[in-house]
Amino acid sequence: MYNPFAGKRGHLNGSVVDMLPVTPSNSVDLSQVAIGLYITVAGNVTFHNVDGVSRTITVPDNFYLICSVSRVLATGTTATGIHAMLA
């Protein structure tokens, strides 16, 4: 899987070049590590970051979650309309 964070820590230079819809899954990673998520409908988002650490964040409608994301888990995710922001 392509990883835009490989060899990088701290500030990233670059911008979002594409957004893809996300179907939460407990077993399938995103096609590439996202630099963040855009969530259209409020709720909880449970995800794995680039280091494989699981996080659960409560977000409002139309929220940009700026964090590395390798997988959005079905278990614990109640938010909908999730899109991966790709570098």
Image (cartoon, rainbow, N blue to C red):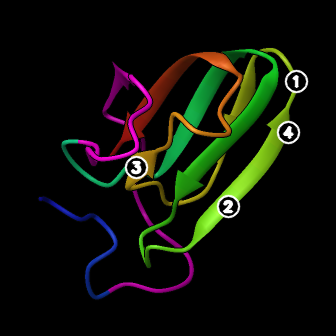
85 with respect to 6 (left or right): right
**Badge 2 amino acid:** Arg
Give the alpha-carbon distance from disc 4 to disc 2, as whole Å: 10 Å
Label 3: element kind? strand
Residue at horizontal 39%, vertical 22%?
Answer: 23
**Cα gap from disc 4 to disc 1, whole angstroms:** 7 Å
Residue bearing mark 4: 58
Q: Residue at x 37, y 56 (%)?
A: 70
Can you give x and y, in whole percent of width and height, for residue 9 in the image?
Answer: 47, 86
Residue neighbourhood size for the residue with mark 1, other residues' Cα within 10 Å, grouped as few (<14), some (14–19), many (≥20): some
Q: Mark 2: which secondary structure?
A: strand
Residue underneath mark 3: 71
Give the percent coordinates (x, y) of residue 3: 23, 65
The residue labelled by disc 1 is: 60
Q: Quadrant of residue 65?
A: top right
Which callout, 2 or 3, points at the residue further toward the start of the chain? 2
